[in-house]
Amino acid sequence: MEHWNNIINTVLLGTAKKPVDKQGLTGPLEQAADSILGNPALDREDQFLHLASVIYNYRQCGTQPITANVPPTPVAPPETKRYCTPAAVRVLQSVLETDSTQLVQLWLEYCTGANLLLPPAQLPVMLDKAWKNKSLRVLTAAAGGYRAEWLGQFNPDWNFSRVADTIEERWQNGATAQRVEALKELRIADPVLARTWLQQSWAKESATVKTALLEVLEQPIDPDDVPWLESLSGEKSKQVKEALIHLLKKQPSSSLQAQYWQVVSEAVQLRPDGTVDVMAPIIKDDSIFQSGIEKLSNNKKISDDWHLLLQLIGLIHPAQWEIHFGKTTAEIMQLFQQQAALQIFIPSLVQAIVWFEEQQRAMTFIQHSEVFYIDLIPLLPVEQQQLLSEKYFDEQPETIIKYAADSPEEWSMPLCTRIMRYAATQPYTYNQLFMNNVVRQIPVAIAGKLDDINATETYHTGYWNNIKAHLARLLHAKSLINTL
Amino acid sequence: MNLSDEQVLAMAPDDSSRKAGKDLANPAKWASKCVGEQALWGECQGSGSKPYQTQIDTGNMAFKCSCPSRKFPCKHGLGLLLLYSRQPSSFDTQTPPAWVSDWLAKRAERDEKKTAVPTAEKTTDTAAQAKRLQARQQKVADGTDELLRWIKHLVRNGILDLPEKDFSFFENMIRRMVDAQAPGLAAMMRELADISYFHDGWQTVFLHQLLRIYLVIQGYRHQDQLPAALQQDLRTLIGFSQSQEELKAQTGIIDTWQVLGKQTSEEDKLVIERYWLYGINSRRSALILQFFVRGQQAAATSLTPGTCLKAELVYYPSAAPLRALIKQQIQLPMNHTFQGLEGWKEVVQTQTNMGSVFPLYNDQVYTITALTPVWYQEQWWLQDGRQQLMPIRKGFPHIWKLLAFSGGAPLPMAVTGREKQYEPLGVWHEQEYKIL
């Protein structure tokens, strides 16, 4: 090494300032240097270039690998499941080209459902996809097997992938997304144990993880959570506090709900003659405003008092009215519609039905209402949702499309046709990205009808045709997944 | 024919063709798509009034399309092959129509002509040829004299201020070498110009390349004292071309050749494709080089990495033969046999032997029995069974795929490179060769 450094130093300075010498050379190199430097026919530059060339070739021919004590890398454990078939991998490649997260999710659902694994060659692409889309992480971890977990040691972006077969393993050793899923599953099977696990680990969790875990307690709401949730009022993190208040608002038996109801029940009174009086609410405890209730109205037509009541009624469980007035659900619905003082609060009542996800009350409301409240759609049985969406499509197409997009169910052909016809009129809103995000809901059979769905405006034609071509590609990929 | 996506896409001339080809691997894009014994063909509706007729000779992997693209293979060819590799059942099995069978017949006829021994000698004006050669040799000699003066001037004054030199410092000499009809030296000078002078250690990289140029010049000047094969190497490095007709007249090595990988680079719109081959029976490696101008249709063969071909290869004359020419070939399914060196010790021994006969050797391909990718001193290395390490070339794009295949365990591997820089091409995973 020393002789090469000497050569480098010489060429850096130039032979005019530092002629080449045989410093550091021994053995055959020294002999070569003697012969070169002793040759009077060579000038300084030739001497340098000759000697440097000899040393270059000497080094080149003597290249040796490095022998080092590299700490041994743990070897990935052998997989216990089979890899998916080459045909399934080819389908996955078609799916990846569509750039639709929903289709990737659909493929992963097939893979994990069949208890199969992603072959190693597909792992880097899929782990990267899951790193960018949180919704794919749990499925990718399940399909990635031990090899994906092993890769996560080297790439911190991929450390969400850990192999855990049982719920307990996932809860104890999993990444956040896996722990959330484990808690969700356990909460359905054994809510008491789920709460115990959460209570045991609570103090050790970070604010972000606490927030993610609290979200699990929303599905389904369990009144037994209330004492523990209320005991957490001392939490310091703002995001955890907000998540707690959000949950307590959804708990009909929480003290926050009791506070809301006290204000409302004093303001809304049933007279002996059957009519209802609505008075200005009296706030005795200002802490109510710390739960997100606004004091002032932002609408000139609605007074601050009425604005306050509208908000509170929208957050009060509809069952409270039934107890308060001693009437059935249907009678309460009729009361709100018949009593002039209460009519203004009907949208709030609808809001409360939606807030507490009261499916039965939603059905009763629809049966007893002359007006169709579109916000109730997600609470209805799938078939009814689609029938009503189709029926009222022309009234509020955008809201219906929004709800249809949020629903996990595949759209009926008539509803899908309506949506596509509307999308053709608004191609800049219902673009390729929109199709990527709803392809799961779009039935494959619509592909055969796309030729008949055309843009209404001439200047939209090209853009809409591109969307249709993209949608056809998505549906083709979806049909391939369906064949697996 | 059973190709993976990677194998099909490795044939693409560039990224945009790769992407467009993927888009066309969709049955909806094809008005018809059929398969025969020897070919695939289909009609794809493009922007023209008539659909483009795309055909693929699956025997020798060749493409033809009626589209106006000058890329080779075009996106339609790639899309059709990709679609077939994914959904072979969606293709109708048919007898080729006239437009396909005519093309196949012409190709077969051309192949026969190629392999036939030339009967009539071309009448060449040997005197004029010798005169032209002499004139070129004079130009090259003048050019190398000038380049040598330039090198010595540089060495005399030192290279300390080289990072501050402007573009023209190298460019003028590169142009001079082109004028002197020494394109090989011009390319070597281009490599010198392309060195990153703002990275640590540029001095060694620079001096290595400068000395290689110096060795070529000195070797060329004293070629009469050198063995014939080395003389040919030096003439190639200067930029004298070798007659392919003459090469084809020679007897080559018939073997089953594994196409271990393909590397593509680009210099001044000239796309260079390097296909690395390994002969299963001859146990020799070979490099097939193809050049074409970006945007122009490439001639020549299209090899599919990760497949095999039964072929007769003729090596270009060299002290360490590597570059070869395919005389005739038949596409075969991959033969996943592995044969290779035990570890790095054997690799460097091979290089030392090569360096002793041809000091200016370039990257080679090696198949090594068991290499494990390991993270050490903030970079990735390949560790052999004797715990010896060689670094993976920086910026190697498929490191994660390599790791996924390995899982920390050693794998038989094909790598290219020399001295202290290697790039994995593929691995034998569960007895199958997989390109990276």
Image: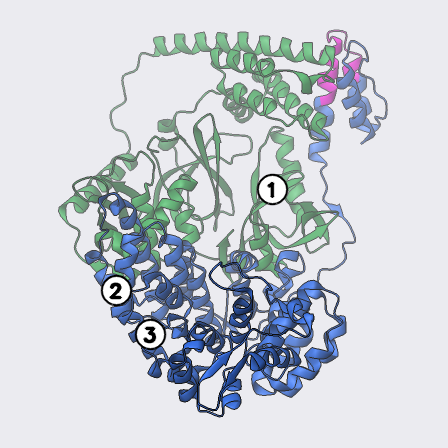
Calculate the distance from the C-alpha at mark 1 to the C-alpha at mark 2. 49 Å
- At numbered mark 3, what does the secondary structure look like: helix, strand or loop? loop
Q: Crowdedness of circle 3 by 10 Å Cα count: few (<14), some, many (20+)?
A: few
Which tag, 3 or 2, sits closer to the chain's start?
3
A133 in relation to A33, above or below = below
Closest to the observer, B258 or A441: A441
Residue A271 included in the magenta stretch of the image: no
Q: From the image, give the main secondary structure of the stretch colored magenta.
A: helix
Q: Quadrant of residue A163?
A: bottom right
Calculate the distance from the C-alpha at mark 3 to the C-alpha at mark 2. 25 Å
Residue at mark 1: chain: B
Query: Which label belongs to residue B395?
Result: 1
Circles 1 and 2 on the same subunit: no
Q: Crowdedness of circle 2 by 10 Å Cα count: few (<14), some, many (20+)?
A: many
Q: Mark 1 and 3 residues: CB-CB less than 8 Å, in contact?
A: no
Task: Name the side, left or right, on which B406 lies relative to A374.
Answer: right
Closest to the observer, A427 or A347: A347
Q: Is residue B303 visible?
A: no
Image coordinates of residue B119 in percent, x first then y, are 25, 28
- Residue tagged 2: A417
Calculate the distance from the C-alpha at mark 1 to the C-alpha at mark 3. 64 Å
Query: Which label belongs to residue A371?
Result: 3
For chain B, give the colour: green
A37 in relation to A281, above or below = above
The mark closer to the camera, 1 or 2, is 2
A438 in relation to B108, above or below = below
The mark closer to the camera, 1 or 3, is 3
- At numbered mark 1, what does the secondary structure look like: helix, strand or loop? loop
> Which residues make up the magenta segment?
A35-52
Query: Mark 2 belongs to which amino acid?
Result: Thr
For chain A, give the colour: blue
